[in-house]
Amino acid sequence: MIQIIIADDHQMIVEGLASLLEDIPNIKIVYFASNGEEVLKYLNKNKVDLILMDINMPILNGIETTLKVKKDHSEVKVLIISMHSKEGYVKNAIEAGADGYILKNTGAEELMLAIEYIMNGKTYYSQEVTQKLVSRMRTIDNPEGITLSPKEKEILKLLANGHTSHEIALQTASSEHTINTYRKNLLVKFNAKNVSQLIKKVVIEGYIM
């Protein structure tokens, strides 16, 4: 059973998310919070698996709350659900440690897909957000001198979408072994321990925005 907090100060949004999730057998909404402070107080006394987090909340906003959650409750997953798709908001959320970012106009199908990905240890960004993240991929004149080939950019884009090596191999007509080699090389290039850290680094360092 996935135990979820919905954190949003807009009652209509809260009710909408609750209605989308209430009939899902393996999901239980355990708490509604209207600000980050309420989220943290609840986490200090209760077990939670996932927080559906708005960014613009009073007292303690979603980015600040995510930072504190990841510091003190690292096992808890955070999915940002926001009306903002600008690169700055997404970058701040990723830097804070969010496991995913989708927009408030997302339908039930994508919301469930995002939850599934995140609870399986992957990251998830909605299509519109991903397009913004990869639209300004850069390959030259970067601070660390790292250059990316067209194939590496393609694989980074698919990784940012949460795809596995097997899925990427099918989409790019490559062998899974080849994709795994690209993944390992990218991890080495950016000194990242895993794919989640890799995506966060390439966004923060400006390779994708």
Image (spheres, helix red, strand yellow):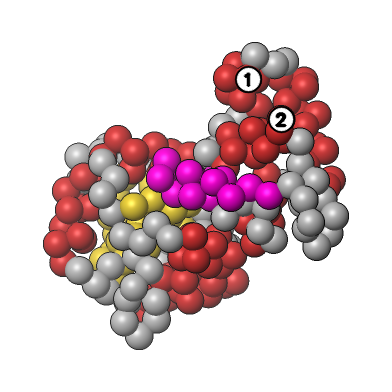
Give the quarter of the image for residue 108: top left
Q: Quick check: 199 above or below 61? A: above
Q: Quadrant of residue 51?
A: bottom left
Q: Residues within 10 Å of mark 2 (few under 14, many from 20)?
A: few
Q: Which mark is residue 172?
A: 1
What residue is drawn where x is 68% and y is 44%?
Answer: 195
Q: In the rendered structure, which amino acid carries the disc numbered 1?
A: Thr
Q: Quadrant of the N terminus?
A: top left
44 or 72, which lies in front?
Answer: 72
- What's the residue type where badge 2 is placed? Lys
The residue beneath circle 2 is: 151
Give, as a single range, the part of the protein colored magenta.
123-138
Would you say 157 lies left or right of 174 here? Answer: left
Secondary structure at badge 2 equals helix
Look at 39% across and 37% down and name the residue there: 113
Q: CA distance from mark 1 to mark 2?
A: 9 Å
Q: Nearer the viewer, residue 142 or 54?
A: 142
Between disc 1 and disc 2, whose residue precedes? Answer: 2
In the rendered image of this protein, does residue 169 appear above or below residue 82? above
Instruction: Please name whichever residue, 71 or 139, is drawn nearer the observer in this view of the structure.
Output: 139
72 in relation to 106, above or below: below
Specify whether 172 is left or right of 129.
Answer: right
Question: Do the residues under discs 1 and 2 have CB atoms within 8 angstroms?
Answer: yes
Residue 127 lies in the magenta stretch: yes
